[in-house]
Amino acid sequence: MSDPIPKELTPQQAYQLIEDDPRAVLVDIRSSMEFLFVGHPKGAVHVPWIDEPDWTVNPDFVTEIRKLLLGGATCSKDGPCAPVVLICRSGKRSLEAGKALLSNGFSNVYHVDEGFEGELDEHHHRSTVGGWRFHGLPWEQC
């Protein structure tokens, strides 16, 4: 049996889910430098999956997401837990981080398939063929 994978959303679908469900949490899992200097979706919470200086998986990632969800208090007896929507640069790290959450008991996990910046174009530029920013969704930078 394969590991469960998070549900894929386009950037537009992710934005709509966050707008429609006030319990939903958008988590930007990129490094601190990416979050601060490249920009991030407006209202996103930052919890890095892999971060500088060691570029290793954050051993506290699952715990930090649990804290965001008040240890599960955002789950109801009759309904699903609050949606957790993960976003990274192009959708690869968020897929892996989503798998980690699902294997640790989370049930309502999504990832943004194009990420914040999308894939590289033929000139090795991002934000030209996909991603949150490419689609004109709300974002900011520090």
Image (cartoon, rainbow, N blue to C red):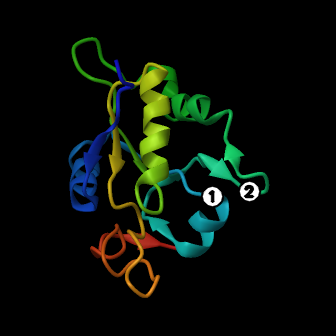
Which numbered dot is residue 31? 1
Q: Quadrant of the C terminus?
A: bottom right
Q: Is residue 109 above or below residue 73?
A: below
**Secondary structure of the residue carrying numbered label 1:** loop
Amino acid type of the residue that numbered disc 1 sits on in the rendered structure: Ser
- Identity of the residue drawn at 42% across and 62% down: 90
User: Between disc 2 and disc 1, whose residue precedes?
Assistant: 1
The answer to whether mark 2 and mark 1 are in CB contact below 8 A is yes
**Percent x, y for residue 101?**
47, 30
112 horizontally vs 73: left or right: left
**Percent x, y for residue 131?**
34, 68
**Percent x, y for residue 22?**
30, 42
Residue nearer the viewer, 74 or 125: 125
**Percent x, y for residue 71?**
51, 22
Direction top: furthest residue = 77
Q: Quadrant of the N terminus?
A: top left
Estimate how packed mark 1 is, as few (under 14), some (14 to 19) or many (20 or more) residues with alpha carbons within 10 Å.
Answer: some
Which numbered dot is residue 52? 2
Residue 69 can be seen in this image: no
Residue nearer the viewer, 115 or 74: 115
72 horizontally vs 57: left or right: left
- Identity of the residue drawn at 59% across and 66% down: 34
Amino acid type of the residue that numbered disc 2 sits on in the rendered structure: Glu
**Secondary structure of the residue carrying numbered label 2:** loop
Q: Is residue 10 above or below residue 129?
A: above
Q: CA distance from mark 2 to mark 1?
A: 7 Å
